[in-house]
Image (cartoon, helix red, strand yellow):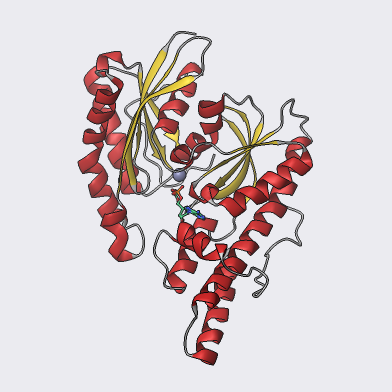
Amino acid sequence: PQTLTVLGLESSCDDTAAAVVRQMPGAGAEILASVGHGQAELHGAYGGVVPEIAARAHAEKLDVCVIQALGDAGLDLGGIDAIAVTAGPGLIGGVISGVMCAKGLAAATGLPLIGVNHLAGHALTPRLTDGIAFPYLMLLVSGGHCQYLIADGTQDFTRLGGTIDDAPGEAFDKTARLLGLPQPGGPSVEAEARHGDPARFRFPRPLLDRPDCNLSFSGLKTALLRARDQLVAEQGGLTRADRADLCAGFQQAVVETLAAKTRRALTLYLQQDPPEPVLAVAGGVAANEAIRAGLESVCAEMGARFLAPPLSLCTDNAAMIAYAGLELFRDGVRHGMDLPARPRWPL
Ligand code: KG4
Ligand code: ZN
């Protein structure tokens, strides 16, 4: 294998990002540059990502990110071997912005174009950060995703199960909104939960009676809403302790649900007799310390290594897209100018 240097673009949600990743023969991959423009302040007033605003901001910022990433890497496009871009799944306006930018760069330079599945980008991150060998078990937990995947190869993923309604990050964000805590909800709910009593409110642990790896988080939100409304009706409002206890009870339900379903996913994965069993996580929710501790103890109990990449690579970023593009390039994948932008694209 020769040295490969890949430029990656990401614009499928609310982060505009570009990165350069290089891999030399016999060595691990190296991130030469990774830049991103978040759009939190653009969407903050609306309580969620507004697709049209996101698409316009991606179109404005993608070229800026590309130029900055190349500058940080000390390269121009002459030093790049391929251009990788998130071609879905995601908010279609943003995905189109990225794909069009990548096509323009490929057309101008003659470089190969590689469309990357955003979820494959997340799922291959443990190989970028730690050189993990296939097969490994992956848990994607973010504001938009929640699924268990066995990664058997660069283009070979088996989905064991996932959420049938909300993603856990979404549930954290909704909980924060219901309790008047700031967005993003994950960190604020986690902070409140630290000084709360997780036993005061007993929230549902949905689907634990089913033997599969599917999860559900929408009922949790309804239960929380009821508990809040009951307290407000009884006392006219919420005390600081009420809020902390509600957060602790909610978080505990998520921790236990994820731990139980992870035990099932690990059982299925271990049936493959992986030589070095690994559970890796990706997604913003993987930042949660209580969730990490829950997953870590399940892994310890079942004899698997628990791997949580650095948070900057767990959340949306372009280094994972550049790296996935690099692996696909080695597999011989090349896309033409007819590469479609796809709103939905299951792995
Ligand atoms: O992966 P990510 O940055 O974006 C996507 O959703 O694609 O994940 C963001 C989500 C948000 O819902 C946020 O509330 C959640 O991750 N999150 C957390 C924590 N930090 C971020 N959830 C629970 N605990 C946290 N500490
Ligand atoms: Zn993502």
In the rendered image, residue 186, in percent from the top left (x then y), is placed at 48, 58
Q: Is residue 79 left or right of residue 326?
A: left
Asked where in the image residue 336 lies, by quadrant, the reply is top left
- Which residue does the image show at 55% across and 31% down from the upper left? 126
Asked where in the image residue 204 lies, by quadrant, the reply is bottom right
- Which residue does the image show at 54% across and 57% down from the upper left? 168
In the rendered image, residue 259, in percent from the top left (x then y), is placed at 69, 52
In the rendered image, residue 200, in percent from the top left (x then y), is placed at 65, 75
- In this view of the protein, which residue sits in the foreground, 346 or 53? 53
- Is residue 108 depicted above or below 270 in this figure? above
- In this view of the protein, which residue sits in the foreground, 307 or 164? 307
In the rendered image, residue 44, in percent from the top left (x then y), is placed at 31, 61
Q: Is residue 247 left or right of residue 257?
A: left
The reply to whether residue 267 is in sight is: no
- Is residue 197 depicted above or below 328 in this figure? below
The reply to whether residue 56 is in sight is: yes
- Which residue does the image show at 43% across and 39% down from the upper left? 312
Number of numbered discs overlaid on the protein picture: 0
- Which residue does the image show at 24% across and 47% down from the upper left? 57
Looking at the rendering, in which quadrant would you find the C terminus? top right
Q: Is residue 254 left or right of residue 320?
A: right
